[in-house]
Image: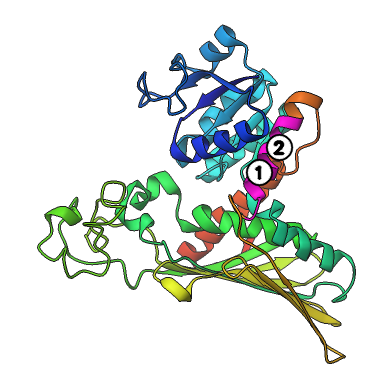
Amino acid sequence: MKIGVIGYGSRIKDVIRVMRKLNPDIVIAGIVDPRYAAGDATDGSDAPPTFSSVDELVRTIGPDGLMIGTRCSLHTQYALEALPTGIPLYLEKPVSTTMEDWRRLKEASLAYATPVVVSHPLRLTTIVQQVKDIVDSGTIGTVEHIQAVNNVPYGGVYYHSWYRDEAETGGLFLQKATHDFDYLNYVAGRKAVAVTAMTSKQVFKGNKPAGLKCMECEENRTCAESTVGTAEEEKWPYCAFAEDTGNEDSGSALIRYEGGMHASYTQNFFARRKAASRGARFLGYKGTVEFDFTTGLIQVFHHHKARVDRYEFEHGEGHFGGDERLAANFLDIILTGAASLSTLEDGLISARMCLLARQSAETQTFQTID
């Protein structure tokens, strides 16, 4: 099975490793990535040939599948080149980082029937699948309110590395909430119709010189955010308190769904250690189901009887098994023409919600999701 890769970064390498566990016959037959150098193959195989464009790669090697793992700002550009080929596509999230790109990709999604798997593994994790089963069973009644949170213990990556460039990331709703909004939509089974949001930057700001690296800073032995002497020293080199550090460090959104139900969501990037938390509460009249990816625990609280049901999951690899299920789904699409479990439409909806949340925070307005 020949795979063409556009953007041969760490995330897409992880996905390919998972795919190879499922199907050892996978071959990276070609790469489009100006940063890739021959000899970068990490599995002992011959270095794949490189190409200057998706068109050249497709014409030369005739891949069975394409995978896009570039930096976020290029996802749409390459998806627009890949969709007309009709070749099954694995597309990293967020699918777009600007509203202009979103509109272009939306138009292309209507013009081409190319099967796409968007990298939203949280919806396919064992823990979210169990929550979905509980909600769909009627145990808690219909979902009438959602409370969701994401306190990110490794948030420094968004200030120490290339992620600090908002032109690349599109802001932290698109980096993190795009996953959370997707699984909330999936579990709720309803369409989001409006969003309002607020962001703040209270911690990762300062007057250190632009471009300053931790290694060069005189405070690198006392600063709690210093990466000097850590495993992240090379990957996360920049000062988190420099004047050129981008990105908000917390954000919240209110989402209205069809039928009037609403969800609250909040994310934070300076929580650390045991303060980490990622999950949600889904409340119905009959009961509440809550889960936390950090603890691997689901609890169902029955409102009208003295009973709490508990489900505990082991973390496992790759987002509680979500990465493996996405990889398996992509392989099934290539081999058997199966349906995508995380479609381009799903990715477009989540990205639209994030883009409008960012716009709402910037303009202090309520945004309609159309």
What is the secondary structure assignment of the residue under circle 1?
helix
x%, y% of residue 226? 24, 62
Residue at (43, 24) in percent of width and height:
41
Q: Which residue position holds label 2?
A: 328
What is the secondary structure assignment of the residue under circle 2?
helix
Q: Is residue 343 left or right of residue 151?
A: right
Outermost top residue: 60
Residue at (22, 67) in percent of width and height:
206
x%, y% of residue 350? 64, 52
Instruction: Give the number of the disc on residue 324.
Output: 1
- Regarding residue 246, the answer to whether it shows in the image is no
Closer-to-camera residue (147/111)? 147
C-alpha span from label 2 to label 1: 6 Å
Magenta region:
320-332
- Please name the colour scheme applied to the rendered image: rainbow
**Residue 87, placed above or below residue 206:** above
**Residue 303, placed above or below residue 175:** below
Mark 2 and mark 1 in contact? Answer it, CB < 8 Å. yes
Residue type, label 2? Ala
**Residue 88, placed above or below residue 221:** above
Task: Tell me where residue 118 sits by quadrant.
Answer: top right
Task: Tell me where residue 159 sits by quadrant.
Answer: bottom left
Residue type, label 1? Glu
Q: Is residue 176 left or right of residue 214?
A: right
Q: How many marks?
A: 2
Query: How many other residues sit within 10 Å of disc 1, few (<14), some (14-19) or many (≥20)?
Result: many
Any magenta on residue 369?
no
**Residue 12, placed above or below residue 165:** above
Instruction: Give the number of the disc on residue 298.
Output: none
Residue at (83, 68) in percent of width and height:
134
